Amino acid sequence: MTNRQQWYSSPTQVFWCCKALAERRTISTKSEIREIKGWRLAAIVERLKREYSWPINAELRGKENVAHYFLAPGTDPATLNYPPSAKSLADGVLK
């Protein structure tokens, strides 16, 4: 299995990230850990931005400068290019 395929083999974190952003939520590593016990949110966000052209913004908050990620204002989630592990969101699962 290639590295590229491995990114898709465990869709929980990628799916969660895509769904949360498409629902117009602002997410952070803390919310990812709390909700799905995931990690490496910054890597997932960077890959969505670079390989799938997601317009994701980040805002650093608090003393610890924790990154909070959100879709750029005016973004229509229906027009986003979803990775394979989150294709079901584009197919109408996300209302």
Image: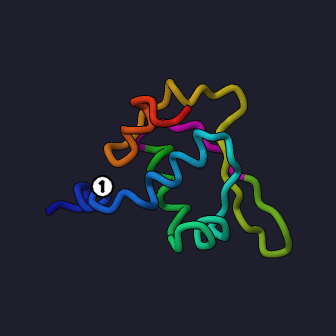
For the rendered model, the colour scheme is rainbow
In screen coordinates, is 38 left or right of 7? right
Which residue, given by chain and number where applicable, does mark 1 sit on? 8
Between 67 and 20, the one nearer to me in the picture: 20
User: Dot 1, how many residues are within 10 Å of its Cα: few (below 14), some (14-19), or many (20+)?
Assistant: some
If the image is split into quadrants, where does the C terminus sit? Answer: top right
Q: Name the outermost residue toward the right.
A: 63
> Height in image: 86 above or below 94?
below
Secondary structure type for disc 1: helix
> Height in image: 11 above or below 85?
below
In screen coordinates, is 43 left or right of 74? left
Which residue is found at the position 62% from the left and 40% from the top? 23
Q: Quadrant of residue 86?
A: top left
Residue 82 at what x, y percent from top left? 41, 38
Q: Name the outermost residue toward the left.
A: 1
Identify the magenta region. 51-58
Residue 71 at what x, y percent from top left? 65, 40
Between 1 and 49, the one nearer to me in the picture: 1
Residue 87 at what x, y percent from top left? 36, 38
Which residue is found at the position 44% from the left and 55% from the top? 14
Between 50 and 76, the one nearer to me in the picture: 76
Give amino acid for label 1: Tyr
Residue 78 at what x, y percent from top left? 51, 26
Which residue is found at the position 46% from the left and 61% from the top? 13
> Height in image: 81 above or below 6?
above
Residue 20 is a magenta residue: no
Q: Quadrant of residue 60?
A: bottom right
